[in-house]
Amino acid sequence: MTVAPQIQPALTGSFAGRRAVVTGAGSGIGLAIVTDLLARGADVIALDLAPGNVPDAATRVAVDVSDEAQIRDALASVAARGPVDTLFNNAGIGSTKNVVDCEPEEWDRVFDVNVRGTFLMCKHLLPSMLERGHGVIVNTASAAGLIGLPDRAAYCASKGAVIALTKQIAVQWASAGIRCNSVCPGTVDSPWVSRLLAEAENPAARREQLVGRQPMGRLGSPEEIAAAAIYLASDAAAFVTGIDLVIDGGITAG
């Protein structure tokens, strides 16, 4: 298989003077978003269960996004810094079970983080955005929310819910100055994939399987997904709302 080259996304567009909240900011796509935003001059508040990997230039806050009380406390401290212009809902967890094998507790936990977390962050940040008549939300969904993947019952269902919620928010408040979009990554070379490989009987063969299902012949990088998310948050996407921007190496085209 011919492998498509990975090209480092170019840094374009300033976010100077803008304040952004990023969840799931401690690793993978979230960390790449934080790093990109900081390079563009944004004031970044990074939320994560363990935000220790986040650069010192960002404000680090330890938060479980499925816990409404923790979100309220975190956003109260954020509000003291001034209004938030952009919300990146990136916190998410995976699951590798089919419907029969997935226990209700695992199903609920995936939905608590992936869907409830996105809902709660939007619920508690949207009022201030609506008051100002301006705000952008970018949700990290997945190509798995658009197609079925084996052994991903809770994950596919949760990301499908994120996509639907994204569209509902976009339609509800488009005329009020709010834009809401999602990015839908394919398989990304992230810490979650690293853990998945570590649990496999044959990590090399499992990685080859993940790579092989993507027509480009490689995994995506967190930086590539971050670049797409940053575009959706930027003024270049001022007429873009309610879309699912797919960055998947061709998985959903098959």
Image (spheres, rainbow, N blue to C red):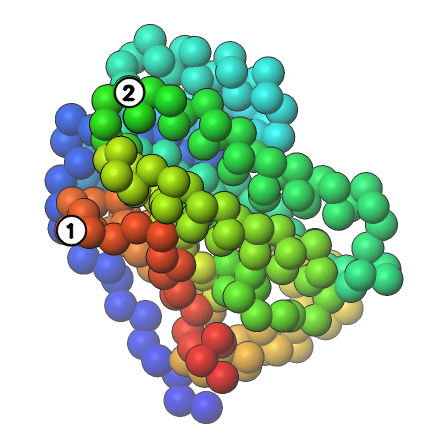
Query: Relative to 2, is 31 above or below?
Result: above
Disc 1 residue type? Ala
Is any part of residue 138 visible from this angle?
no
Q: Position of residue 107 (x, y in %)?
A: 75, 47
- What percent of the width, then of the height, locates residue 28? 46, 48
Q: How many marks?
A: 2
Q: As rendered, which of 160 and 102 lies closer to the eye?
A: 160
Q: Contact, CB < 8 Å: mark 2 with mark 1?
A: no
Mark number, residue 181: none
Query: Tag 2: residue type?
Result: Glu
Label 2 sits on a secondary structure element that is helix
For residue 137, side relative to residue 149 (left or right): left
Report, in whole angstroms, how far the alpha carbon at label 2 lies from the one at label 1.
23 Å
Query: Which residue matches tag 2?
Result: 131
In the rendering, at what x and y percent does residue 14 appear?
13, 40
Residue at 25% over, 53% down: 240
Residue at (66% x, 37% y) in the render: 112
**Which tag, 2 or 1, sits closer to the chain's start?**
2
Vertical relation: 1 (above or below) 8: below
Q: Residues within 10 Å of mark 1 (few under 14, many from 20)?
A: few
Which x, y percent locates residue 187? 51, 65
Outermost residue toward the bottom?
Answer: 1
Residue 17 placement: quadrant:
top left
Q: Quick check: 82 left or right of 77?
A: left
Q: Which residue is mark 1?
A: 236
On the picture, is 187 further left or further right than 34? right
In the picture shown, does residue 251 fall above or below 93? below
Q: Nearer the viewer, residue 7 or 142?
A: 142
Decide which of 55, 148 is in the foreground and name it: 148
Quarter of the image where one finds residue 3: bottom left
> Which residue: 23% across, 31% down?
134
